[in-house]
Image: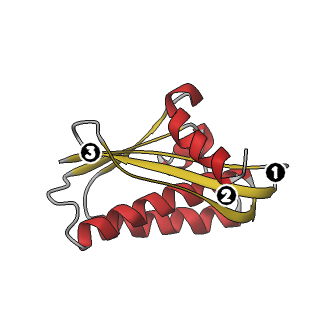
Amino acid sequence: MKLKIHTDGGALNNPGPAGIGYLIYLEDGSLYFSEGKAIGTASNNVAEYTALVTALTKVNELIKNGELRDVKSISVFADSELMIKQINGLYKVKHADMRDLLFKIRIAEGDLGIPVIYTHVLRDKNAAADKLVKTSLGR
């Protein structure tokens, strides 16, 4: 089975009150799980990374407890071009907070033990995740 994940994060006033959102879809396109939540004060970039870490951690939890079985690969979609290019090694990660979060992403990938492919999408292709972020921020 292949999973598809959409993630988003955002902050008001950057940095400011921040929220994350992510959705996990099964191979047939049906929504399996979604979550949006406030994460306190953070920058937009930290919120984007936090959304991804949280989503990968959730998938790992679902696999380990047997709710998801036979997952062979994960495709992640996010509208943060910076984050995707950093994760894919096209841009360096200079900010310490993002380096720490990238390290957590790499640990989550290792725990999953399956291929994770990261793709940048335009904001209109990530509307459901964006809506979760806005709702978490009371907007």
Q: Looking at the picture, does residue 33 appear above or below residue 126?
A: below
| Front in this rendered view, residue 76 or 88 | 76
Q: Residue extending furthest left?
A: 70
Determine which residue is flagged by label 3. Answer: 26
Q: Gap in Å between the C-alphas at discs 2 and 3?
A: 27 Å
Sequence-wise, which precedes: disc 2 or disc 3?
A: 3
Left/right placement of residue 84 relative to residue 108 reads right
CA neighbours of label 2 inside 10 A, class few (<14), some (14 to 19), many (20+): many
Residue at the image point whose x is 45% and y is 58% from the top: 55
Name above or below for residue 84 compared with residue 108.
above
- At label 3, the amino acid type is Leu
Task: Locate residue 80, reporting x and y percent.
Answer: 60, 40
> Can residue 29 be seen in this snapshot?
yes
First of labels 1, 3 by sequence position: 1
**From mark 2 to mark 1, how far is it between C-alphas?**
10 Å
Q: Is label 2 in contact with label 3 (beta carbons under 8 Å)? A: no
Q: Which residue is mark 1?
A: 14
Kindly identify the residue that appears in the image at 69 percent across and 66 percent down. 96
